[in-house]
Amino acid sequence: MPARTINGQEMFAVNDLARLFNLGTKEDPITGGLTITLRGQNILLTQNQEIASVGGRLISLPAPPAREGAAWFVPVDFVARALAPVAGTPIELRKPSRIIITGDFRMPRVAGRIEPLGALTRLTFDVAPPTRHTVVQEGARLLIRFEADALDATLPAPATPDLIAAIHPEGAAAIAIELGPRYASFRSSELPGDRGGTRIVVEVVGKTTDAPAAPAAPPAEAPPLLDLVPAGTLRTVVIDAGHGGTDQGAKGSGGNVEKGISLSLARRLKAALEGRLGVRVILTRDGDTGIGLDERAAVANNNKADLFISLHANASVRNTASGAQVFYLDLNEYGDEAQRAASAPRESLPVFGGGTRDIEVVAWQFAQARHIERSATLARTIEAALRSRVTMNARGLQQGPLRVLVGANMPAVLVEVGFLTNPAQEAQLASDAYQNNIVQGIVDAVIQFRDGRGVPAVPAAPLAPVPQVDRR
């Protein structure tokens, strides 16, 4: 719909609306008002008044109707506030794009963004409502086809023209990604999006160009065994969705189970960390499968993760218990041996080709000992970030002998996002808004931790003598 800005307010012409909705219009020369008729119902408008009478009921408008000569104009919100209640058919107003959708016309909103990430470029499309689609390559372009009548799409401009030359609508219900000369391959995935929508992630991978190497002088010493991560960087994060398979974890009276809540959060957190930080994120499980506690930490160790975050939902015999909690490992159960492991020097071992290399040789049950201080900082940072977004338990930061953290050879925490056994909190835990708040809090905390701005660790409260159901 075309719109005009009058007195700082976007407005539709009544004549345009009349043609679209088959409205009747009649002016009252005495009162200077306008009567609009739709399906036998009258909508009364008066100049200079920010109200309208809709079938005898008063509704407010963001601005009064305007008149220029014989033409009347109404604020764009008039469609949703005045016409929709009497139209007899669904009417949706999309103000940013000034689109009016009536009836069963399928027109999902698609908001795209683009992120160059070195050898690849990631395209993310948030789609609402969720709409079936396919991603295929046809010649020198990728096509995302939607099962829809049309698209309300906001698309980004390419940032790497040698890899992605253009992004544009194709026909009524498709998006074309024109590929550049450096294109090698692509991969796509679908994730849960915000507010019940869908997120389509398309990663376009470029060709690698290795320049001829100049002859190198013999190295003075043997090369390092690993490409060690420079201080202050973050390359890999492992997200652990608690429970799974036959182990459903806690269960709420409304039927929500912990294994489903934790997996939903893990998928959202993966997408958010990849989108904002460009890091590699690995899920210990991406489906309803059972995984042992030590296997979860092993996933992090085998992928040389920089952080390990385990997600859970809590339970208590008291249905009033509520609030999120953040845990890091308590070593007291392991005695003095754990403390010695935390401060033990590295072993110097010979390396093939000559020389030596310092290697950490740590027993599994003491792997987390070396990282307790940094784990405490990460836990405190997450607790502080969540506190500004969701309700925290009175004992929001705690230490505990949690087996899933024991073998993690990197900073590791466990986040209990709330109590499923509290009926009010169960409804929150299942909602998009609450899960998004949890995810944004953790993402902000990870960024602070990565940048060296983590909240200094203070001694956490010991596990409270509250009868909770500990499933770890």
Image (cartoon, rainbow, N blue to C red):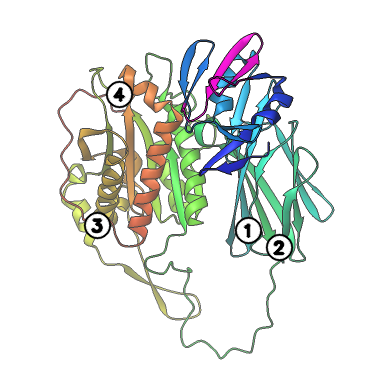
The amino acid sitting under disc 1 is Thr
Q: Nearer the viewer, residue 35 or 284?
A: 35
Looking at the rendered structure, the secondary structure element under dot 3 is helix
Query: Which quadrant: the N terminus?
Result: top right
The amino acid sitting under disc 4 is Ala
Q: Mark 4 highlights which residue?
A: 315
Looking at the image, is mark 3 or mark 1 nearer the viewer?
1
Q: Is residue 378 above or below residue 465?
A: below
The amino acid sitting under disc 3 is Ala
Looking at the rendered structure, the secondary structure element under dot 4 is loop
**Residue 242 makes an appearance in the image:** no
Looking at the rendered structure, the secondary structure element under dot 1 is strand
Disc 4 to disc 3, C-alpha distance: 33 Å
First in sequence: mark 1 vs mark 4: 1
Specify whether 299 is left or right of 86.
Answer: left
Residue 163: give its label.
Answer: 2
First in sequence: mark 1 vs mark 2: 1
Q: Is residue 46 above or below residue 9?
A: above
> Residue 296 placed where, x, y %?
43, 42
Where is residue 329, by image quadrant? top left
- Residues marked 1 and 2 touching at CB (< 8 Å): yes
Q: Mark 3 highlights which residue?
A: 341
> Residue 129 placed where, x, y %?
61, 30
* Number of residues whose C-alpha sits closer than 10 Å to that of mark 3, classed few (under 14), some (14–19) or many (20 or more): some
First in sequence: mark 2 vs mark 3: 2
Q: Mark 1 highlights which residue?
A: 121
Give, as a single range, the part of the protein colored magenta. 27-50
Where is residue 360, by image quadrant? bottom left
First in sequence: mark 4 vs mark 3: 4
